[in-house]
């Protein structure tokens, strides 16, 4: 199985659009987050020869503009597409999905999307004094569990601990996405890196809001098992 990076702040070549936000395609038909805009997302998908018509599901990590920006145009292009959201998302979000003939799926707990694909369901969080629920995508392969996060507002370690409880016999092969550590000091970052090791995370791909200090700390720790995330990258899981 493969993950294709569709939007982030780094890119493999100038043909790709970059900016603040995140999106990736997992497998052949599961889209995780949609970046800051449809224009950027669709340009990058075209450059990677990806077809919206093949999508079967979209998982939105949380209801921030830099993760939902491309969703609405995607729904116009693929009627009936399942959109996995947290129950704590706004009524306006659900209403717009329905207006664009999407199929909203509210995941309040671990939910199976299709064979070997799951969402963690809503994990409570607060960001800037506002309730900001979030979910992560979980993929099970022969190499173990791969986890894709949007911003990890509930705390990346808390999210991983929840996943380990759901899959106690499975190893964590890869954790990638936004870890939201840009405002953390070096001591806190080091503690989180150590928690990744304690949880048995084999490979790591920090992106988006992880921050430069934390990204460098993960790179130093994981070395050959550190994956530099850039738009246009395809990685196997």
Image (cartoon, rainbow, N blue to C red):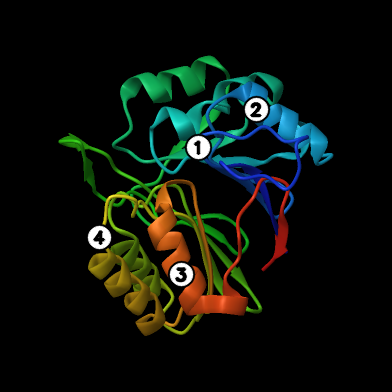
- Residue hosting label 1: 21
How many marks can you see? 4
Between discs 1 and 4, the one toward the N terminus? 1
Task: State if disc 4 and disc 1 touch (CB < 8 Å).
Answer: no
Numbered badge on residue 83: none
Of residues 18 and 61, the one nearer the viewer is 18
Give the Cα distance between marks 2 and 3.
28 Å
Residue neighbourhood size for the residue with mark 1, other residues' Cα within 10 Å, grouped as few (<14), some (14–19), many (≥20): many
Sequence-wise first label, 1 or 2: 1
* Direction from residue 210 to residue 153 in the image, left or right: left
Circle 2 or circle 3, nearest the eye: 3
> Answer yes or no: do the residues labelled 1 and 2 have beta carbons within 8 Å?
yes
Q: Position of residue 193 (x, y in %)?
A: 37, 73
Measure how far apart labels 4 and 2 are at the Cα level.
Answer: 32 Å
**Mark 4 lies on residue:** 185
Q: In the current view of this chain or complex, which residue is farthest to the top?
A: 99
**Residue 92, image x and y in percent?**
36, 19
**Rendered residue at 63%/79% (across/down):** 143
The residue to which callout 2 is attached is 40
Q: Secondary structure at mark 4?
A: loop
Secondary structure at badge 2 equals helix
Q: Residues within 10 Å of mark 2 (few under 14, many from 20)?
A: many
Say which residue label 3 marks: 218
Q: Earlier in the sequence, mark 2 or mark 3?
A: 2
Is the C terminus in the top left, top right, bottom left or bottom right quadrant? bottom right
Mark 4 or 2, closer to the camera: 4
């Amino acid at each position: 199985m493969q993950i294709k990076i569709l939007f982030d702040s780094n890119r493999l070549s100038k043909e790709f659009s970059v900016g603040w936000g995140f999106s990736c395609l997992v497998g052949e038909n599961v889209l995780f987050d949609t970046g800051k805009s449809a224009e950027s997302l669709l340009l990058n998908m075209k450059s990677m020869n990806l077809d919206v018509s093949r999508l079967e599901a979209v998982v939105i990590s949380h209801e921030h503009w830099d993760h939902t920006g491309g969703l609405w145009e995607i729904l116009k292009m693929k009627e009936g597409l399942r959109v996995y959201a947290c129950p704590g998302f706004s009524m306006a979000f659900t209403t717009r999905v329905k207006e664009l003939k999407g199929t909203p799926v509210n995941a309040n707990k671990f939910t199976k999307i299709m064979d070997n694909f799951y969402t963690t369901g809503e994990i409570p969080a607060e960001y800037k004094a506002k309730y900001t629920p979030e979910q992560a995508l979980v993929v099970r392969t022969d190499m173990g569990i791969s986890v894709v996060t949007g911003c990890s507002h509930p705390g990346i370690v808390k999210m991983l601990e929840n996943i380990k409880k759901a899959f106690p016999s499975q190893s964590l092969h890869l954790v990638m996405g936004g870890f939201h550590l840009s405002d953390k000091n070096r001591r806190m970052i080091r503690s989180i890196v150590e928690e990744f090791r304690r949880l048995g995370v084999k490979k790591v791909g920090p992106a988006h809001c992880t921050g430069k200090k934390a990204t460098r700390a993960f790179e130093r720790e994981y070395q050959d098992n550190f994956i530099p995330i850039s738009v246009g990258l395809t990685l196997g899981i």
